[in-house]
Image: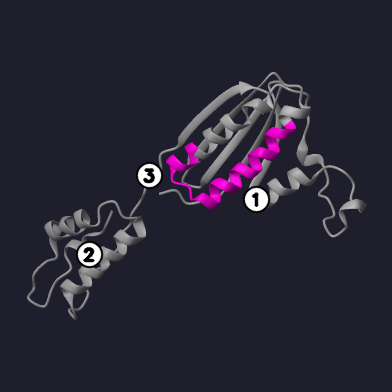
Amino acid sequence: MYTDGVTEATSADLELYGEERLQTVLNRLSGRQPQEILEGVTADLQLFVKNSPQVDDITMLALKIMQIESRSLTLTSSDENTEEVRTFIDGTLEKIGCSEKIRTQFLIASDEVLSNIFLYSKSNSVTLEIKADGGGISLTFSDDGIPFDPLSIEDPDISLPIEERDPGGLGIFIIKKLMDEVSYEYLDYRNTLIIRKKVSIH
């Protein structure tokens, strides 16, 4: 979107910048990020007008509509399915456009969540859902096991030697350090844990 100050910008020869030149520049910048498009048009506009005085306001706005991607997997709560889950998570995140570093952080966090579900929840099944939007990526774990809020556990005092620490809590502590947001609720007789990372997806 732009004001008419863009297309009616005037050169020293009193020629208007015009819609045709703007369209040519936009076609050349097709597929770029909004900031790059605005910078590209501005640079071309300045090249066109050179030192001619500006007679009208020049305002531009570029928007990128982000499509929400969502994929899910449901399987029985068994550690025999760990590798299948890892493949699903890593493959989905790679297709979305995540870096190897981000994928590794999600895999480490997921391993911690799933090991607790498989070993202690007594659930029959677990569903994983990956969602990607303009603000980042979230991974939701939902199981029909015993109600348990892992966020209710106090963070361990990692300044103490291992032998002096109280048992438990290290897994969720690691997850909270790796992710930007972690939330839990017991909804419709299911434990629902959501881990989220704020990353830019192109």
The residue at 48%/37% (across/down) is 91
The residue shown at (76%, 26%) is 121
Q: Residue furthest right?
A: 164
Q: What stretch of residues is rendered in magenta? A: 91-116
Residue type beneath disc 1: Leu
Q: Position of residue 57 (x, y in %)?
A: 27, 67
Q: Which residue lies under the disc numbered 1? A: 178
Instruction: Determine whether 192 is above or below 36 in the image.
Output: above
- Residue 197: x, y in percent? 58, 48
Sequence order check: which comes first, mark 1 or mark 2? 2
Tell me: 100 left or right of 79: left
Give me the C-alpha separation between circle 1 and circle 2.
Answer: 47 Å
Percent x, y of residue 71: 49, 30
Q: Is residue 195 left or right of residue 98?
A: right
Amino acid type at circle 2 is Gly
State yes or no: residue 97 in magenta: yes
Q: Earlier in the sequence, mark 3 or mark 2?
A: 2
In the image, which disc is placed on residue 79? Answer: none
Q: CA distance from mark 3 to mark 2?
A: 25 Å
Q: Is residue 71 left or right of residue 109?
A: left
Front in this rendered view, residue 143 or 26: 143
Query: Is label 1 in a helix, a strand or a loop?
Result: helix
Circle 3 sits on which residue? 65
**Callout 3 secondary element:** loop
Report how far apart the C-alphas of labels 3 and 1 lie in the structure: 28 Å
What type is the residue that disc 3 sits on?
Answer: Ile
Residue drawn at x 48%, y 50% is 99
Instruction: From the image, tell me which residue sits under label 2.
Output: 5
Q: Are marks 1 and 2 in contact (CB under 8 Å)?
A: no
Number of numbered discs present?
3
Outermost bottom residue: 51
* Principal secondary structure, stretch drawn in magenta: helix
